[in-house]
Image (tube, helix red, strand yellow):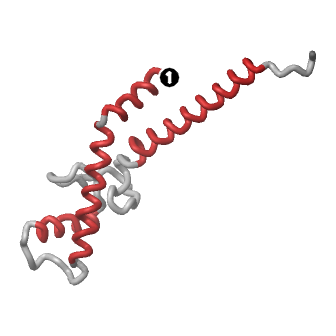
Amino acid sequence: MADIIELEKRRQRQQREKTHGLNEEKLEVLKKVLQCTRCQLKCARCGSQMMEVEDTRHSSLPYPLCAGCGDEYKVYLELAAGKSGGGRYWHNQEWMEIWRTWLQHQKALDQYRDSKEFIKLLHEFEALW
């Protein structure tokens, strides 16, 4: 009888381990979406570290950009608006597409952060803290 496995205790332990793993996964998602993608000390475009929070936001873009990416973004806006002359030889259609899709990606991240499911995830973690 000493060798009988207590199934209920085993099931409870497995459930605790599963819940713990799920909480760790949720926490990792939160860290990536809230902390890493919105760090004010790195460029949202290239990821380079910025030593201080400077006036790196553009009126039409709510993300911090380093000086180089900020200049490139200004050129992108001019070219997208049909103005010419400000671009360099590398500012071709493929370059425009990179900026366009990056902006779409940022918009998708913003929409995810505003989704009811993500907000529910935030509330679940508020309850744990």
Mark 1: few, some, or many residues within 10 Å (few <14, many ≥20)?
few
Residue 11 point in image, percent of width and height: 70, 23
Give the residue pinned by disc 1. Answer: 128
Residue located 35% across and 46% down the image: 38
* Residue toward you, 116 or 28: 116
Residue located 21% across and 64% down the image: 73
Q: What residue type is labelled 1?
A: Leu
* Residue toward you, 60 or 98: 98
- Left or right for 15, reference 106: right
- Left or right for 20, reference 47: right
Residue located 41% across and 31% down the image: 121
Residue 30 point in image, percent of width and height: 44, 39
Residue 10 point in image, percent of width and height: 74, 24
> As displayed, is residue 105 above or below residue 80?
above
Q: In which quarter of the image is residue 21?
A: top right
Q: Quadrant of residue 58?
A: bottom left
> As displayed, is residue 9 above or below residue 125?
above
Say which quadrant the N terminus sits in: top right
Residue 79 point in image, percent of width and height: 13, 71
